[in-house]
Amino acid sequence: QLLRELATHADAVAAVDATAVRWLAAAYRRIGAMCHRIGHSYFEEGSEHYFAYAYEHLTDAHPLHGELIALGVFVMSHLQGNTPDAVRDLRVRSSIVCHPADLGMSADDFRRTFAILPDYA
């Protein structure tokens, strides 16, 4: 549901439109409320989060969480064959920053993250 809504608001997110900012805040509240209600956040943490956590564990670096997760979504959608073109288009439309270089992630750390990811997860 949230991905469908993000697709609807993507252009406004890129423009930092007030309506999009309110939608983003409400989306985070919905996720937080669900995490609180069921007592965990597992339902919203997939392979993209484990990629991010492994990178942070490996490097002790902590780029902006959303940007690191967006990179994880982009990379893992390619690896898993999970609509990577749609993910790319949504990223472009919403202007989400998620290139490793923009996050301060070296090519070596990117590769090393994948090397430790199975054991980390």
Image: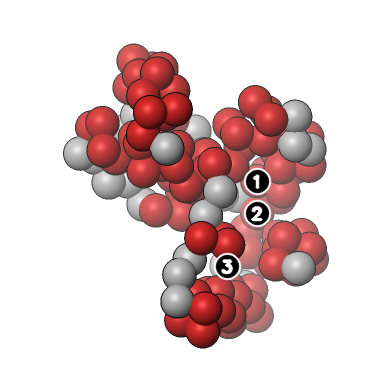
Residue on which the image places disc 2: 94
Q: Position of residue 112 (x, y in %)?
A: 35, 19
Q: Which residue is mark 3?
A: 16
Instruction: For marks 2 and 3, give the one nearer the viewer.
Output: 2
Dot 1 amino acid type: Arg
The colour style of the image is secondary structure
- Farthest-out residue, left: 60
Q: Which of the two labelled residues, at mark 1 and mark 3, occupies the earlier sequence position?
A: 3
Q: Secondary structure at mark 3?
A: loop
x and y percentages locating residue 104 in the rendered image: 32, 33
Mark 3, Cα crowd under 10 Å, few <14 / some 14-19 / many 20+, is few
Front label number (1 vs 3): 1
- The percent position of residue 9, horizontal first and vertical second, equals 73, 67
At mark 2, the secondary structure is helix
Vertical comparison of 59 with 64: above or below: above
For marks 2 and 3, give the CA distance. Answer: 9 Å
Residue in the picture at 58% in, 62% down:
43
Q: Compare residues 45 and 98 and report the one nearer the observer.
A: 45
Q: Is residue 25 visible?
A: no
Q: CA distance from mark 2 to mark 1?
A: 5 Å
Q: Amino acid at mark 3?
A: Val
